[in-house]
């Protein structure tokens, strides 16, 4: 039986720096095995009970994947869909399509720009401090739709 899990988290990189947290905001609610959170975290939270507080280590391969050198390419500045000044570290979507990849400017050399399409956390082992707020059985509708409809199972799909 698949469950819907609601939890708070604090995400840290290998140096211990906090990268993100849900503490003080709305907790995350997801359907186990539906791809709504990274695989390594989903796998390690399976069967967790409400009230559990734990630290979960997720290796890069089960998080955002390893870095892929083929995802880094040099492009002429004139080919980019971005107006105005460009700086190293800037991110933008490569097309107006909502599913177009987001790239990071990794370097600028004259009229060429080095773009990195790897996820910013690719190649990074992650640590999550997790507090399970609640768990419940997934509803038939959630199983059919492939995602959680909220902590209480009530919700609408677009």
Image: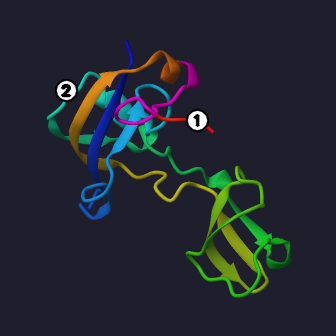
Q: Does residue 131 appear in the picture of this structure?
A: yes
List the residue tagged with mark 1: 157
Q: Which of the 4 image quadrants contains residue 103?
A: bottom right
Query: What is the number of callouts on the image?
Result: 2
Image coordinates for residue 10, horizontal then vertical, percent = 26, 54
**Foreground: disc 2 or disc 1:** 1
Question: Which of these two is toward me, 8 or 116?
Answer: 8
Indicate whether 70 appears above or below 18.
above
Question: Which of these two is toward me, 1 or 38?
Answer: 1
Image coordinates for residue 129, horizontal then vertical, percent = 22, 47
List the residue tagged with mark 2: 49
Quarter of the image where the C terminus is located: top right
Instruction: Name the element at disc 1.
Output: loop
x 25%, y 56%: residue: 23
Quarter of the image where the N terminus is located: top left
Left or right of 121 on screen, residue 8? left
Assess whether residue 32 is covered by the magenta stretch.
no
Indicate whether 156 appears above or below 98.
above
Assess whether residue 145 is covered by the magenta stretch.
yes
């Amino acid at each position: 039986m698949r469950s819907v899990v609601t939890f708070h988290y604090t995400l840290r990189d290998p140096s211990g720096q906090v990268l993100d947290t849900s503490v003080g905001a709305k907790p995350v609610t997801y359907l186990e095995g539906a791809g709504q959170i990274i695989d390594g975290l989903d796998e390690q939270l399976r069967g967790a009970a409400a009230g559990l507080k734990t630290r979960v280590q997720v290796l890069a391969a089960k998080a955002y994947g390893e870095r892929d050198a083929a995802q880094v390419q040099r492009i002429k500045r004139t080919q980019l869909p971005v107006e105005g000044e460009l700086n190293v570290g800037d991110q933008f979507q490569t097309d107006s399509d909502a599913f177009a990849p987001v790239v990071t400017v990794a370097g600028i050399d004259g009229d060429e720009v080095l773009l990195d399409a790897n996820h910013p956390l690719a190649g990074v082992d992650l640590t999550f401090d997790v507090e399970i707020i609640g768990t419940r059985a997934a509803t038939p509708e959630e199983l059919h739709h492939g995602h959680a409809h909220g902590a209480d199972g009530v919700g609408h799909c677009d």
